[in-house]
Image (cartoon, rainbow, N blue to C red):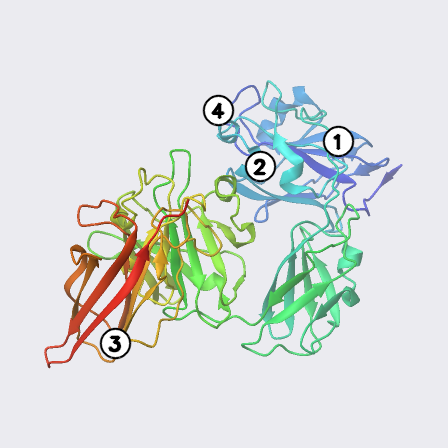
Amino acid sequence: MISTAQNRYDLLITEFLPDPSPSVGLPESEFIELKNRSARDYNLHNWKISNGNTTATIRSDYVLKADSFLILCSASSASLFEPFGATLGLSGFPAINNAEGDIILSNDAGMVIHAIHFDKSWYENDLKAAGGWSLEMIDPSNPCGGKTNWKASIADPGGTPGKTNSVNAENGDSEPPALLRVVAVDSLHLNLIFGEALDSASASTYSNITISDGIGEPDSATAMPPFFNQVKIHLQNPLIRGKIYSVTVQQIRDCSGNEVGVHNQSKTGLTEMPNAGDMIFNEILFNPPPDGYDYLELYNRSNRIINGSDLWIASRDVNGNLKDSAPLIKEARAVFPGEYLLITENPDWVLQHYPKADESAMISFSSMPSMPDDFGIIVLLNATGDVMDELDYDHHWHSPLLANESGVSLERIRSDLPGNTPADWTSASASSGYGTPGYKNSESSADSINDQFISVEPKVFSPDMDGYQDFLYIHYNLPVAGFIGSISIYDIYGRMVRKPVDNVLWGTQGIFRWDGLDEQQHLLPIGHYIIYVEVFRPDGIVINQKLVCVLARRW
């Protein structure tokens, strides 16, 4: 019996070759393999295959029998694939992007039957990702598994077009769907974004969704093609700007029937374009290990909900001109007060090397600015080109106690100080794994200072790079601008052991840091030390203050 498909996933995209060169045995041409996993035959006349931009239509009758395969390729390559199995060459066959892209199969009525969004990380093998090897679905009974259900082919020719995949195995889905985030399109429309494709019926049941603070249930909900991992809802009552709401879902299932579990809630709110100083650089890894990748961490220190798609990154050339500016986030995303964003080319590498990293904060970004291992300049902009933060980093900001700077990030200590304050940056602690991507810095300090003009914290510190009170912070909060000051450190015998600040112009507030080293960069013995601060203005105002601290060791 030949019929028109009414069931999503009756036919599947089960293999494709995004980069056919250099060949290891397959024709040097892209292909997409379809499998009819149903018990019915299907006539594919007027079915479509698309990459999201270009669409090819099957213009003739072609019956794909139950439990059989079909190779789709360009019309000019059909003869090359015919020896491998049933082949159909298409005029205008859509190119498959090498790095990442979409493949969408829809029937003659326009219904999406199967769609995938892939990237090179699916290979989990850099050699095979470089070309000549196909990506194969592991288990056709788990069509929505995404990356967890695909692998690089292990067949000698580099793929298995037209027959059972070389990686074929049972790989069921028992994980419930997770609500990742909710984007406010405007005051009455929200997009709920999940981590996988959903069952359309449960996702489109509006009573399964509620919004806090008196908004209640929406009056409509629609699971959105082609990937069905997003649900668009319309609210009965509008959101209020500046307010943060909570969206909760229940009884929504993925396409394998798993019902949403603990990850069923997300914040939302109306976003705003960031102003200067709202978003800042908070951590930077510019000298990763040889197999590693740079990363940049951003922090929303404002009380506003920032529109992530308004964030741009750039660097500066030798003349100080901005270069290589690029938007950070393609899709709509809100960044809430106190939240972090982690920008890197390879989130998987970051997760492997920093196990505590927050995956939900990560953005895969292929246009990272150049960040040399010694020093450089990076700039954070908004969509209108206003500079929000600029960091002129230097590897000398690292702790002198480090034996090797490779793989160690620089962390901001206080978020309320200017970004180019060297004393406000230091090496991530050893106990943190030398990095805290996407969460609170290991060497962070309180963002408020004592009411006194000068204060120190902590009173007892232990400079051993374990991430706990490794530095003494000397805060100042002066009544007016224009002070020039010095800081001298003495041991209990009255001998000056360090002068970290010598007659420099101070702002009205800021921070200096002492690492427990003497002038020769040797670690001082444990004991009490006196911090003597002297600041003066040309008009005769003088402030002198002595403070006591303890240099200790942790065993």
CA distance for labels 4 and 3: 66 Å
Verify CB contact (< 8 Å) between mark 4 and mark 3.
no
User: Which residue is pictured at 74% across the width and 35% down the height?
Assistant: 140
Verify CB contact (< 8 Å) between mark 3 and mark 2.
no
Which mark is drawn over residue 22? 4
Q: Nearer the viewer, mark 3 or mark 2?
A: 3
Quadrant in the picture for residue 444: bottom left
In the depicted structure, whether residue 120 falls above or below residue 367: above
Say which label, 3 or 1, has the lower sequence index: 1
Label 1 neighbour load within 10 Å: few <14, some 14-19, many 20+: few
Q: Quadrant of the N terminus?
A: top right
Say which label, 2 or 1, has the lower sequence index: 2
The residue singled out by tag 2 in the image is: 122
Q: Position of residue 445 (x, y in %)?
A: 39, 61
SS label for mark 3: loop
CA distance for labels 2 and 1: 18 Å
Is 95 in front, or is 39?
39
Which mark is drawn over residue 170? 1
SS label for mark 1: loop
Which mark is drawn over residue 478? 3
Q: Position of residue 432 (x, y in %)?
A: 45, 46
